Amino acid sequence: MKQFKILYTEDDETLAFLTKDNLEQNNYDVTHCCDGNLGLEAFKKENFDICIFDIMMPKKDGFELATEIRKTNTDIPIIFLSAKTLKEDRIKGLRLGADDYLVKPFSIEELLLKIEIFLKRSQKNIPIEKFVYEIGKYQFDTNNFILFNESEKISLTQREAELLKLFLDNKNSVLKREQILTSLWGTDDYFMGRSLDVFISRLRKILVNEKGISIENLHGIGFRFTM
């Protein structure tokens, strides 16, 4: 069984010891660095399978470290662990190319599960699911079903959020009506089709003032989301 290599940066010695010990007990090979500069040096010298970065570190913080790594490697999974709880910090981390963001104090069981999921996906070359999208003036948080910016927050239903995410993942491409229905409801049903029309109508109203963004109805075929 392959022993996966983890690059772990954390300046809190106690937390680092406990986390590293737990990871090693689960058969991971962990390289721990106490600041961002050492983390970057280690990354350049060895091949790692996943990175786990604290954000508030001396010399080079986790955001800066992730930015440097993404210049040369766009595929390796990156998980942030941080006491920074603001929504803006989480969004910043995801925009920099991180795959997840766990807030301290975190559950070691949750961290282990995240590592397992991201390693399986990266080994199979399956794209990591994206959770925050930019749509015109809005940010779209798919986990919490909201569109927001500095002055406005719009709550979506779960189905509306799922539909918008489906459009974004297939932007500028034709989605057949039955493809959408099966993806969202698991069946190509007439009554579900009527609900789909209602959801699309509401998304159009929300995005009506966003230049270059539209949901085009292709009669007898389906829809195309362009942006």
Image (tube, rainbow, N blue to C red):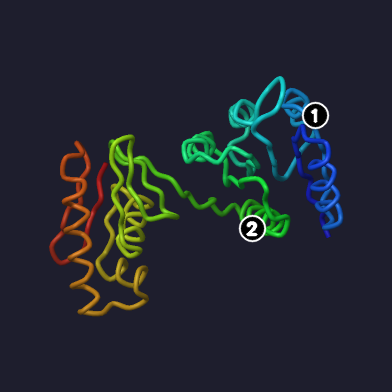
The percent position of residue 186, horizontal first and vertical second, equals 37, 76
SS type, badge 2: helix
Q: In this view, does 215 lie to the left or right of 126?
A: left
Q: Name the residue under label 2.
A: 117
Question: What label does residue 45 carry, if any?
Answer: 1
SS type, badge 1: helix
Q: Which residue is drawn at 62% across and 34% down?
A: 73
Q: Is residue 53 left or right of residue 127?
A: right
Earlier-in-chain disc, 1 versus 2 = 1
**Above or below 157: residue 92:** above
What is the three-letter code of the residue carrying label 1?
Lys
Q: Nearer the viewer, residue 52 or 169?
A: 52
The percent position of residue 185, horizontal first and vertical second, equals 34, 74
Please give the count of numbered marks on the rendered protein.
2
How far is mark 1 from mark 2, CA to CA? 25 Å
Q: Is residue 196 left or right of residue 70?
A: left
Does the CB distance between marks 1 and 2 fall below 8 Å?
Answer: no
Assign the C terminus to one quadrant of the image. top left
What is the three-letter code of the residue carrying label 2?
Ile
The percent position of residue 4, horizontal first and vertical second, equals 78, 50
Q: In this view, does 76 lie to the left or right of 213?
A: right
**Picture quadrant of residue 202:** bottom left
**Above or below 138: residue 219:** below
The percent position of residue 115, horizontal first and vertical second, equals 68, 53
Q: Which residue is drawn at 56% across and 54% down?
A: 126
Q: Residue at x 58, y 47 (%)?
A: 100
Q: Nearer the viewer, residue 132 or 5?
A: 132
**Above or below 82: residue 3:** below
Q: Residue at x 21, y 79 (%)?
A: 191
Q: How crowded is mark 2: few (under 14 residues within 10 Å), some or many (20 or more)?
A: few
Assign the N terminus to one quadrant of the image. bottom right
